[in-house]
Image: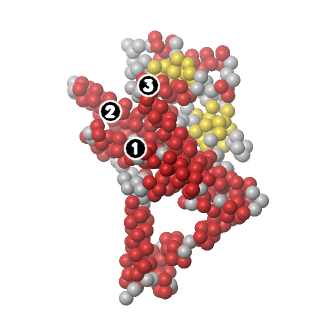
């Protein structure tokens, strides 16, 4: 992930989800792109922005040309009236003069004060705490939420492990397996719940490429450690906000984290609005105990979501490395064959997402090159498959169920009891990996093939 410098000049102090749009150049390929920037966060009014900050997904952009994830350098004012917090961070890349910094802080403070109730405390806003790094600001936010230093450090170690696993995956199955063996105890239920939440969070903020790359990494890890927990976020249906609120209110403390992971796609701005409304209802009814319990649980949900989300940011560059190398090489086939063990589902998803972006932007030459890479990668993968698995792959790629049935009838010599058994084994494997639609498709093919045996 590369930083992109922006400038104080022209940036407005804004609150809320409707951020301002800026124009910048990708630091990797220099292609122009437009991105959204938030410069002030009010934790009470917009908890989803707080969650994105802690998850490392605030002021992020993705280059449509090369797929590079970009961290945009922008000033940030963080405010939490309930805890009387006023935090400020100016990225060093901005080289902001003192008068520019003071003007920004003054504008942000004035905007926040106007939004406060008449009798609310204001003194803490007059001397906001300044942070040299964004990570130190995030640590202070977590500490104010009651997260211990030990938990913060444990989270940082988990983020580091995700990054190292992604890098190892880029080098191949052998390197990944070696690192997994070293840290097998850390790759547990909580670890997978975190990845599932990050997948959902990435999709929620429009980073589908990041979600797909995390999904591919998760599946490889699950297969290597024999994880058989709940399925990943890839096939999860949309969850109604009201249902998510009710289930998380009713959950016990012991089951809360697992349920947050399960419901992560539904935990968005609307969710927190609905949750806050429930707190307000309890306060208006004079039920102070319920209001306090719901407020405390909301903090736990925010803390858990951000802890689960932050790990997603480490994956982009590692997963896209092979594609960049193939694009830059005079002979992409040589690169792909030399690193054929890295041509997996994640790689194909990155190729397809970049291909779609290139088609949308009318980059004809890039489209042709990406299509060549996609064709070569598919060819290399199929060459490594057994005739049986190659035929199964063709069945799964059939455009319609009728086309797959026709393929079965045209290849009756391939249909044996062992072939049917293989289809059912793959279906069970898909189910264990949380890919139930794919599992059901394989099971349907097995049923059709069974009929053709007689």
Q: Looking at the image, is mark 1 or mark 2 earlier in the sequence? A: 1
Seen at 52% across and 44% down, the residue is: 162
What residue would you read off at disc 3?
A: 143
Q: Residues within 10 Å of mark 3 (few under 14, many from 20)?
A: some
Q: Looking at the image, is mark 3 or mark 2 earlier in the sequence? A: 3
Seen at 70% across and 60% down, the residue is: 335
What residue would you read off at disc 2?
A: 297
Q: Tell me the CA gap for discs 3 and 1.
A: 21 Å
Seen at 65% across and 51% down, the residue is: 321
Seen at 39% across and 86% down, the residue is: 453
Residue 104 figure quarter: top right
Return the residue nearer the eye: 259 or 423.
423
**Image x and y of residue 231, in percent:** 39, 55
Q: Label 3's element? A: helix
Q: Residue furthest right?
A: 330
Residue 145 figure quarter: top left
């Amino acid at each position: 992930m590369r930083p992109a410098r922006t400038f104080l000049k022209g940036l407005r102090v804004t609150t809320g989800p409707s951020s301002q749009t800026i124009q910048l150049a990708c630091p990797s390929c220099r292609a122009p792109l437009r991105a959204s920037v938030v410069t002030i966060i009010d934790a009470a009014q917009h908890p989803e922005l707080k969650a994105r900050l802690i998850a490392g997904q605030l002021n992020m952009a993705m280059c449509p040309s090369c797929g590079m994830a970009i961290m945009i350098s922008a000033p940030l004012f963080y405010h939490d009236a309930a805890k009387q917090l006023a935090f400020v961070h100016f990225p060093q890349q901005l080289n902001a003069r003192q008068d520019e910094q003071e003007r920004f802080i003054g504008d942000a403070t004035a905007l926040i004060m106007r939004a406060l109730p008449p009798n609310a405390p204001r003194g803490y806003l007059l001397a906001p705490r300044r942070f040299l790094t964004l990570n130190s600001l995030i640590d202070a936010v977590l500490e104010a939420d009651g997260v211990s230093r030990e938990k913060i450090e444990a989270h940082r170690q988990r983020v580091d492990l995700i990054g190292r696993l992604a890098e190892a995956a880029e080098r191949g199955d052998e390197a990944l397996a070696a690192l997994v063996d070293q840290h097998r105890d850390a790759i547990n239920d909580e670890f997978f719940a975190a990845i599932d939440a990050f997948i959902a969070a990435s999709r929620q903020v429009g980073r589908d490429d990041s979600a797909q790359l995390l999904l591919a990494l998760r599946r490889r890890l699950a297969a290597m450690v024999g994880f058989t927990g709940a399925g990943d976020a890839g096939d999860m249906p949309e969850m109604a906000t009201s249902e998510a609120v009710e289930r998380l209110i009713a959950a016990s403390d012991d089951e809360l984290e697992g349920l947050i992971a399960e419901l992560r796609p539904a935990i968005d701005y609307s969710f927190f609005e609905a949750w806050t409304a429930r707190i307000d209802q309890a306060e208006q009814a004079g039920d102070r105990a319920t209001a306090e319990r719901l407020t405390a649980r909301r903090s736990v949900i925010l803390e858990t979501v951000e802890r689960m989300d932050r790990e997603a940011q480490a994956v982009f560059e590692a997963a896209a490395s092979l594609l960049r190398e193939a694009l830059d090489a005079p002979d992409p086939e040589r690169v792909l064959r030399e690193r054929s063990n890295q041509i997996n589902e994640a790689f194909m998803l990155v190729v397809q997402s970049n291909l779609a972006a290139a088609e949308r932007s009318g980059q004809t030459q890039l489209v042709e090159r990406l299509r060549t890479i996609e064709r070569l990668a598919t060819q290399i993968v199929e060459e490594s498959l057994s005739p049986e698995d190659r035929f199964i792959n063709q069945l799964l790629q059939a455009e319609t169920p009728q086309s797959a049935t026709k393929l079965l009838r045209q290849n009756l010599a391939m249909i044996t009891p062992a072939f049917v058994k293989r289809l059912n084994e793959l279906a069970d494997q898909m189910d264990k990996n949380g890919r139930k639609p794919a599992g059901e498709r394989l099971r349907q093919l097995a049923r059709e093939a069974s009929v053709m045996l007689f």
